[in-house]
C-alpha cells in the first residue's frame, strides 16, 4: 500500500519474498527509492492517473504488465493491479498495488 506521495504504508510478506526487503526497511520510503527490481518509472503514469482520480481501467482496477527482476536476480513478468484507496469523502488517499506473477 502506498500513500499519495508513493511512500510505502504497508509492505506484505509476499513483497518481502519477491524483493528481499523487510517491511521495516520499506515502510515510509518512496517506492522509487527502494532497491528492488520493479520498473517504477514505467508504472508512474498509471499510478499518478489513479491518484488523480482517473478511472482505474473502467469497472475493474487498472492492471499493467511489466518485466521485473526479483531478489534472486531472475527476470519475471508481473501483472500490477492498481486500486485507489479512498477516504470517506471519496477522495483518493493512496494506492493498493497487487503484483502477480504471469
Image (cartoon, rainbow, N blue to C red):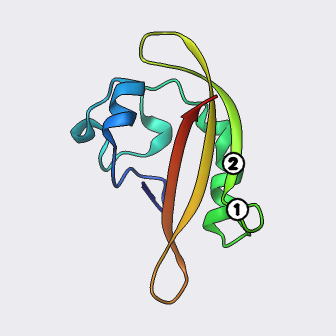
From what the image shows, is residue 73 above or below residue 3? above
Q: Position of residue 14 (x, y in %)?
A: 37, 35
From what the image shows, is residue 1 above or below residue 71? below
Residue drawn at (46%, 26%) of the image: 36
From what the image shows, is residue 52 above or below residue 83? below
Residue drawn at (71%, 35%) of the image: 65
Residue at which label 2 appears? 63
Locate the C terminus and report the quarter of the image it occupies: top right
Say if mark 1 contacts mark 2, CB within 8 Å. yes
- Residue farthest along the top direction in this orientation: 73
Residue at which label 1 appears? 60
Residue drawn at (55%, 81%) of the image: 91
From what the image shows, is residue 25 above or below residue 70? below
Q: Position of residue 56 (x, y in %)?
A: 70, 63
Relative depth, front residue between 31 and 64: 64
Residue drawn at (26%, 33%) of the image: 22
Quick one: SS at disc 2? Answer: strand
Which label is found at residue 18? none
The answer to which quarter of the image holds residue 12 is top left
User: How crowded is the residue under tag 2: few (<14 C-alpha within 10 Å), some, or many (20+)?
Assistant: some
Q: CA distance from mark 1 to mark 2?
A: 9 Å
User: How crowded is the residue under tag 1: few (<14 C-alpha within 10 Å), some, or many (20+)?
Assistant: few
Amino acid at each position: 500500500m502506498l500513500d499519495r506521495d508513493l511512500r510505502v504504508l504497508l509492505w506484505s510478506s509476499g513483497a518481502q519474498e519477491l524483493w528481499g526487503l523487510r517491511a521495516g526497511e520499506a515502510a515510509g520510503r518512496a517506492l522509487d527509492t527502494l532497491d528492488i527490481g520493479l520498473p517504477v518509472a514505467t508504472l508512474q503514469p498509471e499510478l499518478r492517473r489513479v491518484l488523480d482520480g482517473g478511472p482505474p481501467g473502467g469497472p475493474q482496477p487498472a492492471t499493467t504488465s511489466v518485466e521485473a527482476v526479483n531478489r534472486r536476480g531472475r527476470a519475471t513478468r508481473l501483472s500490477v493491479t492498481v486500486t485507489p484507496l479512498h477516504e470517506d469523502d471519496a477522495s483518493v488517499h493512496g494506492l493498493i498495488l497487487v503484483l502477480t506473477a504471469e
